[in-house]
Each structure stands twice: as structure tokens, then as C-alpha cells.
Image: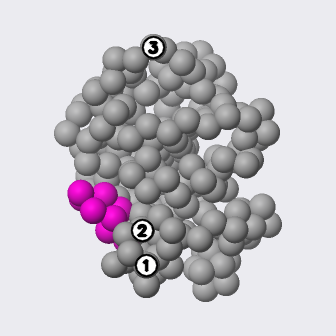
């Protein structure tokens, strides 16, 4: 995975490669999928959710550039893999499923970094409000059936996502149904 997928895709930051080597992907898929955990494509984990390809997670780590003082929200696809990659690199980390985010009315808490482990069609106001001023977001962005990795930063209360790479990121089922997210 490190040499044949990540390095050949331009993912060469030593800290990214170290984290991806340290966290066994096979621990985050069903037993029947363990032999496919390192394939260069998304692996189904059940209920219409997927573990994204290794290159997707490598790019997400690289683009997010986590810092020790980051307070991170990971909107996950049900695997927990991306959160485990990030956990030792940041001050605090919370995970929420796409279903929780789509239907939650919980108290407002902001984060310096948000990663969405999947693709969304648009950034809803609810998720943008969870990002603190100057905070960063990394997500898949599905536009006209093309999925791209996108990054954004909250400046003057507004977040704009900028695509940075065309890659196959599974669309999060809950976000595909919901146009606006509230917390």
C-alpha cells in the first residue's frame, strides 16, 4: 500500500506514511472483507457504507495537515479508520456518523478541523457553523457525478470548498438524502 499506492500517487509526507503503516486497515472492515482491506478502491463495510481507498485517506491526511492543538470532528462512514489515523496527532477528536450529523439538534460546539470521511453534495450551514473562524475542512465533494477531494477554510464566517483532486470517494448515504444539516 505504502509503495504501490501512496508513494506513486504523490503521498510522501513521512508522518502520513507512518500513520498509515501503523493502523491496520483490516481491523476496520468486516471479517469477510479483510483480504480486500488494502485494495486500491473502496471496500464495502455494510449498510451501503465503504472504507475509502488508501489513497483517499492519505490525501485527506495530507490536505488536513493536523496540528497538536487541533480540536477535530470526523464525520465518518462507520469504519472509524480515519479517526484512528488522526487521534494521536491532535488535541481532541470527536466522531459522528453521517446519520447523527444529518439529524442531530445537539449543542453547538466548534472545531478547528473537520474531516468528512466520504463525499457530500454541498456544505450545509449546520456543518459550516461547527467550524471555528480560521478552521479547516477536508471532504469529498460530489458535483455532477464527479467526486473530488475538497478543502476549505472559514474566513469572515463563510466557508468555500475548493476541489484539489479528482478521486473516487463514496458518497455518504445520510448526506445524499439531506440538503441541510443541523446540529
Q: Is residue 49 magenta?
A: yes
Q: Pointers 3 and 1 in contact (CB under 8 A)? A: no
Q: Tell me the residue at 66%/47% (across/down).
A: 87
**Rendered image quadrant of residue 167:** bottom left
Comparing 47 with 62, the one in front is 47
The residue pinned by badge 2 equals 29
**Mark closest to the chain's N terminus, 2 or 3:** 2
Rendered view: 71 above or below 29: above
The residue pinned by badge 1 equals 34
Number of residues whose C-alpha sits closer than 10 Å to that of mark 3, classed few (under 14), some (14–19) or many (20 or more): few
Q: Which residues are magenta?
A: 43-50
- Could you tell me how far apart the alpha carbons at marks 1 and 2 are, in whole angstroms? 6 Å
Rendered view: 115 above or below 92: below
Inspect this view and state whether residue 62 appears.
yes
Comparing 137 with 143, the one in front is 137
Q: Quadrant of the C terminus?
A: top left
User: In the displayed image of the protein, which residue is found farthest to the front?
Assistant: 31
Q: Secondary structure at mark 2?
A: loop
User: In the displayed image of the protein, which residue is found farthest to the left?
Assistant: 177
Q: Is residue 30 magenta?
A: no
Q: Secondary structure at mark 3?
A: loop
Spot occupied by residue 72 in the image (x, y as percentages of width and height): 61, 35
Q: Left of 40 or right of it: where is 153?
A: right
Disc marking residue 107: 3
**Mark closest to the chain's N terminus, 3 or 1:** 1
Number of residues whose C-alpha sits closer than 10 Å to that of mark 1, classed few (under 14), some (14–19) or many (20 or more): some
- Could you tell me how far apart the alpha carbons at marks 2 and 3 are, in whole angstroms? 31 Å
Amino acid at each position: 500500500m505504502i509503495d504501490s499506492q501512496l508513494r506513486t500517487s504523490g503521498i510522501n509526507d513521512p508522518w502520513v506514511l507512518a500513520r498509515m503503516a501503523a493502523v491496520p486497515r483490516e481491523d476496520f472492515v468486516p471479517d469477510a472483507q479483510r483480504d480486500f482491506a488494502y485494495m486500491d478502491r473502496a471496500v464495502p463495510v455494510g449498510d451501503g457504507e465503504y472504507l475509502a481507498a488508501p489513497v483517499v485517506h492519505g490525501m485527506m491526511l495530507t490536505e488536513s495537515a493536523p496540528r497538536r492543538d487541533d480540536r477535530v470532528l470526523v464525520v465518518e462512514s462507520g469504519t472509524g479508520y480515519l479517526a484512528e489515523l488522526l487521534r494521536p496527532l491532535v488535541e481532541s477528536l470527536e466522531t459522528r456518523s453521517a446519520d447523527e450529523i444529518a439529524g442531530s439538534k445537539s449543542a453547538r460546539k466548534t472545531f478547528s478541523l473537520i474531516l468528512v470521511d466520504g463525499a457530500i453534495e454541498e456544505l450545509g450551514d449546520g456543518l459550516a457553523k461547527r467550524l471555528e473562524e480560521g478552521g479547516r475542512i477536508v471532504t469529498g465533494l460530489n458535483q455532477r457525478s464527479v467526486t473530488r477531494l475538497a478543502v476549505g477554510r472559514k474566513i469572515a464566517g463563510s466557508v468555500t470548498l475548493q476541489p484539489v483532486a479528482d478521486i473516487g470517494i463514496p458518497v455518504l448515504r445520510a448526506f445524499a438524502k439531506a440538503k441541510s444539516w443541523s446540529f
